[in-house]
Image (tube, rainbow, N blue to C red):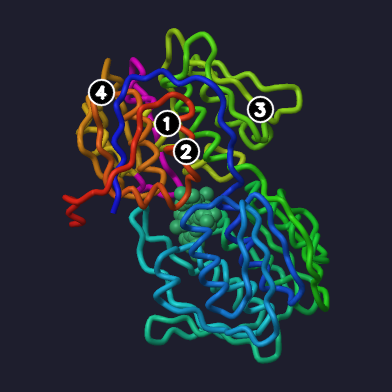
Amino acid sequence: MEKLIVQGGKRLHGSVNISGSKNASLPILAAALLTDEPIRISRVPDVSDTNYMIQILSQLGASVERSSGTVRIESPDGISSMASYEQVRKMRASICLLGPMMARMHRCTLPLPGGCVIGDRPVDLHLRAIQSLGARVRVKGGNMIIEAPNGLVGTTIDMRGENGPTVLGTDNLMMAAVLAHGTTVIESAAREPEVVDLANFLIRMGARIEGAGSRTITIHGVERLHGCDHTVIPDRIEAGTFMVAAAMMGDKEKGVRLNRICREHMTVISDLLVECGHSVKYNDAGTSAVVKPATEPKGGKIVTAPYSGYPTDMQAQMTALFALTPGLSVVKDTIFPQRFMHCAELGRMGANIKVDSGTAVISGVEALSGAPVRASDLRASAALVLAALAAEGETEIRRLHHIDRGYELLDDKLLMLGADVRRAPDVNNCDCD
Ligand code: EPU
């Protein structure tokens, strides 16, 4: 185990390159199983979640090579239809193997993902979708055994759950439907840019998909897909995290420049920062932005919602910013109402946050003070790093593996911006929950 030691109070300056999207890369890597021809995917971030996915693909029998952000995958006929619990338990997103495995082999055995610190995270919608395409699902020994001996057949499916559309559920259904007989219509589909990136990748492979990015996606099944090259979209959540870092600790005159971003995907994130008084100026192409802190920051209100609403994956980072913003701010997470583990840790640093029924009420304080804190999940860890950058004194963030799941070279990038951060082995870590 490692920890991150942050000496707070250093102003950030210069520029940072945003990596490719983790959440777009994961289903795209899984979709490589849909063909036996070579696939080349560029700008795959080197984070532990993409590494887990690559390990699973290799374990299934695909040959995978990775070098400097590019992953080359070839999945010959005869790949295994059984994923091992040891690999899958490391990452909930491994559920997105379900669609491509069912499309390619018409059967698969996948360990049921367990609970998760950010909420229950059921997979009922994924299973309902694959059943609608004609598959049978059994649960035995902790595994989902899914079979469609006569192949998958297209139909119309409404993917809306109690908390809105599902991102990986939409991905799974789209990947299952591309090789199904006939036409599949996904109603209440997720509209996230990562879903659109997956659809564009599948279209490059020869799939016939219309409407990705809207609430209704239509997929006409084809006989086979072929190899292709694809470049993953920029990571809007990593970009948002650096925008918040710049709003909290950026140089007041020059700010921080973020490169390799996509303005269209960032609108709701940067609009909120601007409403709170911070400055976000994009270049004409919308591929880079300079973010400067407000002279008189204002609090705000977030209600998370499916895209194009405010992303649940950014609420923890904004909570860290609101902790140091005068006045009251409110953060309500409608997608994962239990996703507030970071608030108690921010409290150890002096933040004044009350959490009740999926809502955090944050009363801004003048200063936070460094403290030993524990990361509980990916975005919670990001919030703690942001708070630590602004806090007085030293913060030690334990259980750093959470941040390594989704932020490529975070400490190197922060060092380049002038932060005082270093990694160290965590010999005293007590991993009690
Ligand atoms: N849901 C169900 N049943 C299902 C599936 C989902 O009830 O079968 C519920 C969930 O419990 C949640 C809502 O539907 O309340 C939306 O969850 P969704 O399925 O969209 O989440 P996901 O696809 O499993 C992806 C991201 C998450 C991100 C969510 C929401 C990936 C790999 N993960 O998860 O990212 O929070 O969408 O936008 O794409 C992260 O990067 O830190 C992360 C957790």
* Nearer-N-terminus badge (2/3): 3
Q: Are marks 4 and 1 in contact (CB under 8 Å)?
A: no
Residue 120 located left or right of residue 73: left
Would residue 236 be found to the left or right of residue 263 on screen?
left
Asked if ligand 1 lies within 8 A of label 2, the reply is no
- Could you tell me if the residues under marks 1 and 2 are in contact, i.e. CB atoms within 8 Å? yes
Foreground tag (4 vs 3): 3
* Front position among marks 3 and 1: 3
* Nearer-N-terminus badge (2/4): 2
The answer to whether residue 433 of the structure is visible from this angle is: no
Find the magenta span and give its range: 321-339
Residue 372 in the image, given as x and y percentages of width and height: 20, 37
The three-letter code of the residue at mark 1 reads: Met
Q: Which residue is mark 1?
A: 318
Query: Which residue in the protein does label 3 denote?
Result: 288
Neighbour class for label 2 at 10 Å: few (<14), some, many (≥20)? many
Residue indicated by mark 2: 314
Q: Would residue 337 be counted in the magenta stretch?
A: yes
